[in-house]
Amino acid sequence: MHERLAAPACQAFPQAVPIHMSRDVLAAYLNASAQPPPLLNRMTTTAAGKLYLGGPRLPLCPPRVQPLPGAGCTRQDLSDLLFYSFGVSRLHLSTPNATRTTLELRRPVGSGGALYPTQLYVSHQGVPGVPDGLSHFDPLHHQLAVLLYGDPLTGPDRPAHHSVHPPRITVLLTSASWNTMPKYQHFGYRLITLEFGMVAEQLGIVGHALGARCSLTLEWPDAFSRWIQPTGDERPGPVVTLEWPDTERPKVTHNAPVRTGAVSRSPAVPGLTTCPLAWQVEIAAANLPAAPHSSSSPETLTPCPGGASSVFRQLRARRSSGEGFRNVPVSGTALRNAISEVSEWIDGHDTTLLMVARAVTGIRPGIYRFDLLNPAPVPASCPDPAVLLLGGTPGATAQSNQPAAWLYLTAKLDLHSDESAARYRDTQIRIGRLLQRLHLACTAQGIDGHVSLAYDVHLTQHLFSLNGEWYPAAQLVLGTARPETEHFSMDFRATAPAWPTAPGR
C-alpha cells in the first residue's frame, strides 16, 4: 500500500461525476469477450485491482476544442495533454430507426491490438494550480489519482505546495500484459510494445503542440519505481518528459501563413519527433468533417502531420476499426505527401514501408516499397525492379467493399541474437511511434484510415516471399470511415465539492 500523504493547502478542484456505463457497452468497446472478468472490474470501479486508486482524486479541466501553446504549462494544458494523448471520449451512436442511443468509448490513439492495457503515471512539477506530486491517470473519469505529494526525485519530505521551478511533466507508461494473454497469447507482447510507441509518440506530438520541449527514454527511473511499484502483471515502458518553455522552438507568429505544396522537416529533438508548425494551423471545430482531398488542388493539403488541425480536430473524432465502415476514395497526391512527411523516420535498416494499392488515384494497383530518398512509389512500368517496385497484386480478388490501400510497417529482426529481446522491444516501440505519426499524416491530408492487425493470409504470405527476412509488424488501412450517423459528445458533468484531504488535516 502506498503512503498517503496529507494534501497541501491549495484551491479546491471540482469533483467530476463518474461516467456510468453498462458492462455490455464496455465489453463491446474493449472487444474482450475472451478476457477474464477482473479486466471489466478494473475499468468500471475506482479501486478494484489497484489499491492506490482509493487515494486523493484530482479532477482535471474539460479539454479545450482549440488548445494553443502558451508561455508555460497550466492546469488546463495538463488536462489537454492527457486527454488528447490517452483520454476517453463519449461517442453516441444513433440507430437507423432513431429509437435509442448507445454509448461507446473511443480513444485518441488507434489501438495496435492490445486493447489498451497501458497505464499512465504522471509526475507534475511546477504546474500552476496543481500541487507537485506523482499520480496515476484515470482516463474514464478524466482524473488523477494522487500517489504522493512532492517530487519523486527528492522524496515526499520536501514541502510540496507549488514549485517555483519551470513546469515539468514526466509521463511513465506501464502495461498489464495479462490483459492481452487470453486473447492474443504470445502475440500480446508485440501488441503492447506497439501501443507503447503509439502512445509515447502521441504524447510528444500533443506536448509539442502545447509548447513543450519533449524527450523520450526507454530506461525506467529508479526514483519513480520506489513510489509507483507496478503490480506483478505490469511491465515498465517508455518515459516521456515535457518541459516548458521550449527554448529551442523557433519564434513564429500565430498568424503566419502555412506553406503548402512543400515538405516540412522538423528539427531534431532527443528521443521524440516534433512539429514546428503545430501552432500555425487553424483548428477546425470538433463536429466538422475533415477537409476533402483533391489531387488537382495540392495547395489545400496541410504539409504538417503533427499540426493542430490533425492533432486536435482529428483526435476528437478519431476513426477507429469496427463495424459499419464505408469506403472513401484516396488521392495518390495526398498519400505521397503524407508518406513524405514521415519518410525521414524510416531508418531503412530495421524498418521499411510497404504499400498495397487497390484504388488509389494516380497509382497503379500493386505492391510497392518506398525509397527513402524519393518516397513516391514508382509505377508498375518502372524498368528497374530493384529500385522500388516489388511487383504483383494482392492475393485476394479486389472487391468494392475493400479498403483503397494498406500501408505495412515491417521490421527486420534477428531473434537469435543475444540482444534480441531488448532489440525486439525497441524496434516495436519505434514502429508504433512511426505508425502513429503516419496515421496523423494521412489524416492531415484528408485520408481516413484505421490501425488493424487483421492481416490477409494470402497477402501476408506474398509479402513474406517478397521481403524475405522482413516481418509484418503493423498495418494502416486507408480509405475507410465511420458512418455519418455518429456524433460526439465531450461534456464532463461536474459538481463542486471540496477536494478530499487526508484524515486529521
Image: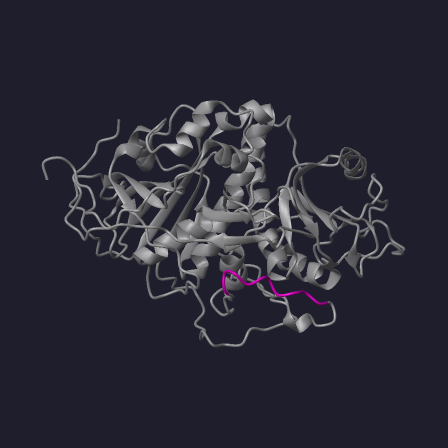
Residue ID at (24%, 48%):
132
Q: In the visual, does 395 lie left or right of 333?
A: right
- Please determine whether, in this image, residue 465 is positioned above or below residue 402: above
Whether 299 is among the magenta residues is no
- Please determine whether, in this image, residue 399 is positioned above or below residue 288: above
Nearest the viewer among 1 and 151 is 1
Q: Is residue 478 visible?
A: no
- Quarter of the rendering occupied by the C terminus: top left
Query: Where on the picture, by quarter, is residue 184?
Result: top right
Which residues are the magenta region?
285-294
Check the image and tell me how it is coloured. one colour
Q: In the visual, does 153 lie left or right of 411?
A: left
Q: Is residue 483 visible?
A: yes
Residue lying farthest to the left in this orientation: 504
Whether 288 is among the magenta residues is yes
x, y percent for residue 423: 57, 34
The number of numbered discs placed on residues in the rendered structure image is 0
- Quarter of the rendering occupied by the N terminus: top left
x, y percent for residue 113: 58, 36
Nearest the viewer among 183 and 351 is 183
Query: Where on the picture, by quarter, is residue 6?
Result: top left
Q: In the visual, does 212 lie left or right of 162?
A: right
Nearest the viewer among 12 and 405 is 12
x, y percent for residue 484: 61, 55
x, y percent for residue 286: 50, 60
Most prominent secondary structure in the magenta stretch? Answer: loop
- Please determine whether, in this image, residue 484 is positioned above or below residue 184: below
Q: In the visual, does 427 lie left or right of 359?
A: left
Query: Where on the picture, by quarter, is residue 475?
Result: top right
